């Protein structure tokens, strides 16, 4: 197993690169090419022409291409050019108008039981996952 270079903070997979196999990166990852395999990284930026076939796990992800597989991210942005076929798990989610998602959305954390008297609390004060739809 190769040692990781801790000084590297950003890795790029260009449009002319096609990878078959899982990717695990401690650095941020920008993918413009094609990946067949699972991806685990700190932050993922996916280019518009990119295709990922496999599960994606990241702290933050900004998706603009095609993903066929599940996605789990603390902060997830799905741009209008994105096409996703798989379940999406998130803490905070933003979806641009025009994005296509075929799958289920669910918060990453287990839903908390809310007492009946607290049902009408201001949503800004709750710990529930945030959902934003960009126009």
Image (cartoon, helix red, strand yellow):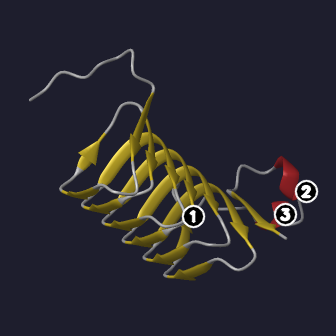
Numbered mark located on residue 117 in the image: 3
Q: Secondary structure at mark 3?
A: helix
Relative to the observer, which residue lies in front, 61 or 120? 61
Let me know if residue 110 appears in the view.
Answer: no
Pick the quarter of the image with the N terminus: top left
- Residue identifier under label 2: 122
Numbered mark located on residue 105 in the image: none
Let me know if residue 56 appears in the view.
Answer: yes
Label pair 2/1, CB-CB below 8 angstroms: no
- Left or right of 105 on screen, residue 85: left
- Residue identifier under label 1: 64
Of the two numbered discs 2 and 3 in the rendering, the one whose residue sits closer to the viewer: 2
Sequence-first disc among 2 and 1? 1
Q: Residue at x 49, y 75 (%)?
A: 84
Pick the quarter of the image with the C terminus: bottom right
Figure disc tally: 3
Q: Residue at x 39, y 15 (%)?
A: 7
Q: Secondary structure at mark 2?
A: loop
In the rendering, at what x and y percent does residue 119 appear?
83, 66
Label 3 packing within 10 angstroms: few (<14), some (14-19), many (20+) = few
Whether residue 68 is situated above or below residue 127 in the rendered picture: below
Relative to the observer, which residue lies in front, 128 or 62? 62
Relative to the observer, which residue lies in front, 128 or 92? 92
In the rendering, at what x and y percent does residue 107 appear?
57, 62
Label 2 packing within 10 angstroms: few (<14), some (14-19), many (20+) = few
């Amino acid at each position: 197993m190769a040692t990781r270079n801790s000084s590297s903070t950003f890795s790029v997979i260009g449009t002319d690169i096609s990878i078959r196999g899982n990717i695990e990166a401690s650095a941020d990852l920008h993918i413009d090419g094609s990946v067949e395999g699972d991806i685990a990284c700190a932050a993922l930026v996916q280019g518009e022409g990119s295709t990922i076939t496999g599960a994606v796990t990241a702290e933050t992800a900004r998706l603009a291409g095609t993903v066929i597989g599940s996605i789990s991210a603390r902060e997830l942005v799905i741009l209008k050019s994105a096409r996703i076929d798989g379940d999406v798990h998130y803490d905070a989610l933003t979806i641009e108008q025009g994005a296509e998602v075929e799958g289920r959305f669910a918060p990453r954390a287990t839903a908390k039981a809310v007492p009946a008297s607290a049902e009408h609390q201001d949503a800004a004060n709750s710990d529930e996952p945030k959902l934003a739809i960009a126009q």
